[in-house]
Image (tube, rainbow, N blue to C red):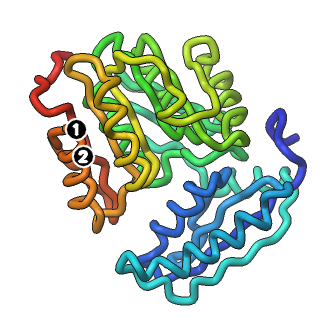
Amino acid sequence: MPPHGQPDEWIRVSIQVTPAAVEAAGELLRAAGCSGWENPAPDTVAGYFPADGRAEERIAALQEQVRALDQYGLDPGPALVTAQAVPARAWEEVWKEYFRPARIGRVIVAPTSEKVTLGEGEVVVRIDPGMAFGSGAHATTRLCLLALQQELRAGGRVLDLGTGSGILAIAASLLGASRVLAVDNDPEVVPIAQENAELNGKAAEITICEGDITTVEESGWDLVLANIAPGPVLQAAPRVAGMLAEGGVYVGAGIPAERADEVEAGLTSAGFRVERVLREAEWVAIVARPAGAAAAST
């Protein structure tokens, strides 16, 4: 059976581009609210949408966005976007074929079907096949998990913007955060993140809701994670600066490496001091504090 509350049929969207543009195409799928993605070939990325009234609109928008990658210095090559209906059970089998435990620092991301042996200080985040973006397979997720481990202080309060599968929020709770709020502006993603929180025994510790930075009223956050895209990371920055606790940190990710300088400059203009940039493949995550703030002790 498909996960509770999920449709019986999905649309598998496949994007064929040049190998250099694969990561960007995957990010476009994520930004479009894709539930699950894979990289079946060096020049192909594929993701899954519910077979609902929005599917055709999403596919058309993706086609335009893929063709526009050349505006960012990436050759999209064939820029071929195709779609086919996939039964939920078949989709889960696809996940099982490629989704294996991934160790990112002290965090291990694994499906429930895989046995995991934990070392000292390690935690496991369980993500089952058939759920939303955020399996640890994408560089942006791994970079955020590393930044989370480096920056989360004992009992810290964490805000996760664009939570997707909820993987970062769940990891934060498992690593000892005292308060975790996760928001996503895609209403279809929220129940998936909630289901993942339940799967990890963290439903009571994590608040998950539809929204974005403008709907968050709480302040005093020790760590704000935004694994989204350059534009939203910068748009959220001024508000985040006023919501952080003393010594708090803003981590922006979903940023192609070629746009790192642009985002660093934008964060500086918004009143942040960039402390470091984490890099993997063609992606970066930027760790920043409000200018003049001192690093908090862990």
| Quadrant that contains the N terminus | top right
Res. 287 image quadrant: top left
Answer few, some or many: residues within 10 Å of disc 2's Cα (few below 14, many 20 plus, some between 14 and 19): many
Instruction: Please tell me which residue is depicted at 87% across the width and 54% down the height of the picture.
Output: 9
Residue 163 at what x, y percent from top left? 54, 37
Query: Which residue is at 50% across, 25% downward?
Result: 216
| Count of marks placed on residues | 2
In the image, 211 versus 222, the foreground residue is 211
Q: Disc 2 marks which amino acid? A: Leu
Does 70 sit left or right of 38 as displayed? Answer: left
Residue under the point 35% across and 80% down: 73
Identify the element where label 1 is drawn.
Answer: strand
**Alpha carbon separation for disc pair 1 and 2:** 8 Å
- Relative to 263, is 38 on the left or the right? right
Can I make out residue 195 in this image? yes
Question: Few, some or many C-alpha atoms within 10 Å of disc 1 (few <14, some 14-19, many ≥20)?
Answer: many
Closer to viewer: mark 1 or mark 2: 2
Identify the mark at residue 288; answer none if there is no mark: 1
Give the residue type that dot 1 points to: Ala
Quadrant of image for the C terminus: top left
Q: Quadrant of residue 79?
A: bottom right
Q: Which mark is residue 10?
A: none
Between 282 and 239, the one lying in front of the other is 239
* Circle nearer the N terminus (1, 2): 2
What secondary structure is found at the residue carrying circle 2?
helix
Q: Position of residue 130 (x, y in %)?
A: 72, 46
Cβ–Cβ below 8 Å for labels 1 and 2?
Answer: yes
Q: Which residue is mark 2?
A: 267
